[in-house]
Every structure is written in C-alpha cells, then in structure tokens.
Image (tube, coloured by chain):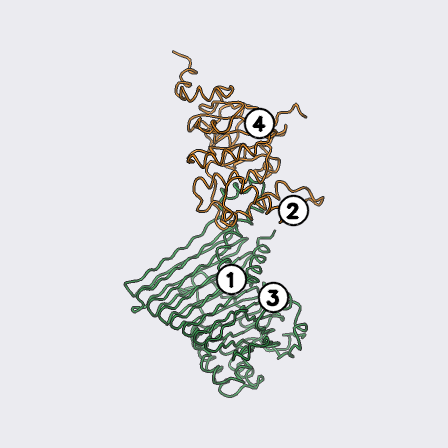
Amino acid sequence: MEASVQEATKGFSRRAAEELSLRRGEPDWVREMRLSAWDTYEAIPMPKRTDEEWRRTDIRRVPIDDVVPFTELRDKAGSRQDLPARVLSALSTGVEDSGLNVQVDSSPVYTEVQPGISEQGVIFTDLQSALEHYPDLVRTYLFGAVPVDDNKFAALNAAFWSGGTFLYVPSGVEIEVPFRNVVYNETPGASVFSHTLVVAEDEASVVLVDHWSSAEGEDLSLSCNVIEVHVGEAAQVRYIQLQDWGRNMWSFNTQKAHCAQDAQVNFLNVALGGKFSRSNIAGILNGAGSLAEMLGIYFADENQHIDHLTRQEHVSPYATSDLLIKGALKDRSRTVYSGLIKVHPHAQRTDAYQSNRNLVLSRNARADTIPNLEIGANDVRCTHGATVSQVEEEYIFYLMSRGITRTEAIKLIVDGFFDEVIERVPVEEVQEFVREAIARKIGL
Amino acid sequence: MSDTPLFQVENLHAGIEGEEILKGVDLTINRGEIHALMGPNGSGKSTLAYIVAGHPNYEVFEGRVLYKGENVLEMGADERAQLGMFLAFQYPTTIPGVSMANFLRLAVNSVRGEDDGEGGKKRIAPREFRRMLREKMQMLNIDESFATRYLNEGFSGGEKKRAEILQMAMLEPEFAIMDETVSGLDIDALRTVSEGVNKLYDGTMAMLLITHYQRLLNHIKPHYVHVMLEGRIVQSGGPELAEELEAKGYEQIRSELTPAG
C-alpha cells in the first residue's frame, strides 16, 4: 500500500477530471457528470473575505494547486487485518457494526457487510461500485441533496470524488447496529474527495458512523467531502461524523439532509483535527412534521481554524429543528460559527432552536459566533442563542475546595460542558471516542 | 505534636478588593471541639470561611492561618482539602454537566487516595466507592437519583445543603467549617442535616459552625461559642453565650462592648 505523490501531476484541471474518469473506467455519463461539475466549479468564484459567509475565514492559503487530485487505485484488502494500522485502531475492538467500508486516499479498499443485512435489501458499498451495479438507483439520488452548484467545494467534489460510500435502506427496514465508514488519508499531499450518499426509504431506519483520519506529514493534504442524506417519509437516519484529520489537512465538508414528511435526521459532527476545517451543514425540512437534530462538538487547539456554517431550512409546516453545537478552544486557535434558521412562508408552526456555545480556554484563542433568523411565516417558534465564555473561576474554586487540582477541575468542567451534547447521542462507542478525544485535547 | 492545636487563626487581617473586612481575628480550635461562630450579616464570618478555604478573590493583609501547625495561606484550595480541611458552602456553586457521582469519585480519590509511590494517588475501587456513596446517602436521607444529577443543578435549597453534607461525609475531613448550613431550611430538612452532622462527628474531628441564628445550636451542641462583630471576635464563651445572644440580640452586645461616652 506504499504511495507517493512525487510523480503525479499536482493541481486540479478539466483534464485531470477526465483522466480520473478514464482511469477508473467509468461510463460516459459519469465522465460527463464530472466534466460538467468542473465547469460549474470554474464558474463559481473562489470565496473571498468580502463574501458574507467567509468574512471570518481566510482561505487564501488553501493548497489547492499543491496537492495531487487523486492517487493510483490501490489493491483491495482481503480482510480487516490487511487494513492500515491507523484504520484498524479507529475500529475499536469488540464494537459491532452492520457493515464496514474503508477508503484510503482516493481508493475504496474494503467493504464488508454483516450476514443478514443484504438479504433485507440493504446496499452498503463504495460509491464507485454502486454506480457500476445500481446505476439507476444512484443516479436518482446523487447530487440530489447537495446540488453540484451548492458551493465551490461541493462542485470540486462532484468533479473529483472517488471512493465514497453508498448506503441504501429499503422501505420499512430498520437496522439498529451502526454502519461504519472509515476514510484515511495515508499519503500527505494527496486529496481525499469522499462522497457519502445515504438513502433511507419510507419508514426505514439506519445509523452511519463516518470516521476520518490521516497519517501525519509535512505536505499539505486537501479534503473536499460531501455527505448527502435522503430521509424518506417517517424514516430515521442518524449520521455521525468524527473528523480527526492530521494537522496537515485542509478540510471542506458539505453535508445536507433532505427530510420528507415525518422524517427524522440526527446529525452529530465532531471536529477535532485538520489545520483548517470548514463544514457546511444543513437540515432541509421539506416534509411536514419532519425533524432535524443537528448536534456538534468542536475542540480547536494550536493554530487550528475550525469553521461551521449551518442552515435549518423549514420548507413545510409542523417541522422541528434542534441545533446544539458546542466548542472549546485553546492555544492560538480560532473558531467561527454562523448559522441560519430560515422559515419559508408556508412553514407555519415551525419549532426551531439554535444554540452555539463556546468555551475559551486560552487568552489567545478566539471564537466568533453569529446566529441568524430569517422568518417568512407568522406562527412559528424560533429560539437562538450564542455564547462565548471562559471557565468560571467560581466553578474551579468549588472543585478545588474538594481536593481536586486545578487542571483536573478544568477537565471536569470541560467534560461537563460537552456532556450535554454527548449524552444525546445514544451510540456508546461514539460517546467513548468523543470523551477520549476531549481528554486528549485538554492534554491531561 | 499533640500540643499543636488542629486549627489556629492568628491576627488575621484580610478582605476583598482592597477593603479590609477581617480586622485581627484570633481563634484556636483543638481536635474534637465544636465551635460556633455567630454574628450579624456582614460581620465577616463568611469571609473568614472563604479565606480559610482559599478563595482566590480574597486577600490577606496580615496574620496566619495554621492547620496542624502549617501555614495554609500559601497553599491552593486543593492542597488544603487534601490536608483534611473542608468547607460546606453557604451558597454552593452549580456546575452544569458534571455529575455528582463523577465529581465525588474524583474528589474522594484526590483527598483520601494514598500515594501510589509514583507521585499519583491510589484510586478507590469503584465498588467500594459505590457502597460508600450508597451508605452515606441513606444516612442523609438522600434519594439515589442524586448521584446521576448534575452538581447542584436544579437542586432545591435543602438539597444543596444536603449535598454539601454528603460531600463532607464522603471526604471525611478532620476539620470542617459549615457556613450557614441549615439557614433557610424547613424543620424536617434541618433535622435531617443536623442529624447527619451529628453522626459524622466522631469525637475526634473538629467543626466550626458559622451561623447567624441560634436555631442550629438547638440541634448541634457546640463546646464553644464566639461572637463576631465588624471583623473581630468580640466575645467567646461556652454554649450559654449562644442563649445569651438569643435573649439580648447582637445590638445589645454591640452597645455593651462600646465604651460609653
């Protein structure tokens, strides 16, 4: 599985998109899709600080011309044991899954589905294989939730995605044990353009845990991932993203769920790694009575820049959206949160909640938070709140007066701060992962 | 060693934001003694408690606070607690997200844990901790659900005070200051809390009960009573002093002490 980016051509171009398609042996229609996406990418200007959505995030140094757009296709792993060590360590032992899909750099290297799952009509595979085997099904949904022109980096993903994940759950099928997707950037200097497509038909129910990590290295890597979630009537999808990239990664994430009537989506986005991380996360409540729970945790340190842009879009009446994103910052890190609750004129009886809380642990760190409302209906309940605060000295003193050291006291308070989010995610191994990650970040 | 008093305050001048509140306090407490410190609001009782516990906002201008002969004023609040001192707060802090059980486990480990020989502390076994917690909660008539709730969050006044005494029961201090531990409690809660305190008093530990009201002293019998006025201990005596105070009120004491003319 050795790889190098030495000989490969750096930078993105129409020709590179075409070459990727040819090397993967894709049908013409897929290649056309990529090339048209490239045109869209070219047509959208690179974001600048003067754009409202990018006012606090500077991407002039994005290594877009320095990375290779895709790497050579790797051999498939014969079994879990053949996967890279870092991937294996991400798969905590003894944790059950309904299926596992692994992508290394731009190659799908492993897919496994537990017995009894496929028999129920569930499809879980990499997106490239899905295109080959279920072209009509994939075509129905691909770029349906996140249109190619959603933003410049979504367009770049549409032109250069590789590997990817396709999870399809037919009507009425409920799978309790999570599916797991691991994306691993093994080659510094390479791109990782994963594309996750989840389709839950009416009354289906499924959980997907997405874990991103990378080998540490000097060369900067780039990731433009897209996550599309289609939730059918009265269906439920829980999508959990554990972003744990190495510090050489520039990460762009576009994630959107479309919810039909009475559908429910539960997001948890955990942002830990990367030099730079920008996530556009949206819950689109197309159907009446639908619900989007959008939870998030971020913890920035050193010189990390972590930026979240969220959107709770109420298209139909009687829908609920509930967003709670909490972040901690230390060292010289920066975080930006900006979120919009948008209520369309017909979306009466909307119930929308949006809350972003920041805990700043160092004098040199800075958090910006900008909540926004845009309400077109008159009978709605929308609440939003944003805070940036420090650890209360009174809390620290109280804990210390019980013999707990200052560092342990701060750790306890920060754990408690995040616990409100963690305990709302009933997936034990995820809770454990997040708690450990927080402990690691605090540095005790 | 046995001659050294457990706790001593010597000529303590201290305050907050540059303002002197304690104006020369002297107090000695030996092992096994229960002292009551009484006085009107604003006389400096709570300031004394905070300074002894090590609150960072308070400053000491002069004097010493000795515990087992060691000056604790240079120590952090955590070190003081590890030495065996405890303060039951008048207004306990609410800390969201921190469960009572997690907090108590960490506190017990910090205070009781023996050195593991590598600069750390031996941890109390989880089963032993749970057994102990259950036992102490029963003793204080505290519902088991308490353990999973966040520290003081949504607790009633009585629950907060009981939670303070539960912490004291778990940490088993040798010296405890209780700042208005029963004020504001109804009679049932008062009885439970004071019974709990009486059970914890084993004859060797020492206590300083800070109270505005005589009421507490009907339930917990002090050996000594001190009266504090305007930052000084102006009178000390046996339990009868509390009754005298109840009869006369602080104003009368004040005027008796002020030289006429």
What crowding class fits label 4: few (fewer than 14 Cα within 10 Å), some (14-19), or many (20 or more)?
A: many
Chain ID for label 4? B
Question: In the drawing, what numbered circle is on residue B67?
Answer: none
Mark 2 lies on residue: B123
Label the orange chain with its letter: B
Q: Residue under circle 4?
A: B64
Mark 3 element type: loop
Residue extending farthest to the left is: A378
Q: Earlier in the sequence, mark 3 or mark 1?
A: 3
Secondary element at image label 4:
strand
Q: Residues within 10 Å of mark 1 (few under 14, many from 20)?
A: few
Q: Which residue is denoted by mark 3 in the rendering?
A: A95
Nearest the camera: A33 or A97? Answer: A97
The Cα–Cα distance between marks 2 and 4, rounded to whole angstroms, is 33 Å
Q: Tell me, what hue is chain A?
A: green
Tell which tag, 4 or 3, sits nearer the viewer. 3
Query: How far separated are the C-alphas under marks 3 and 1?
Result: 14 Å
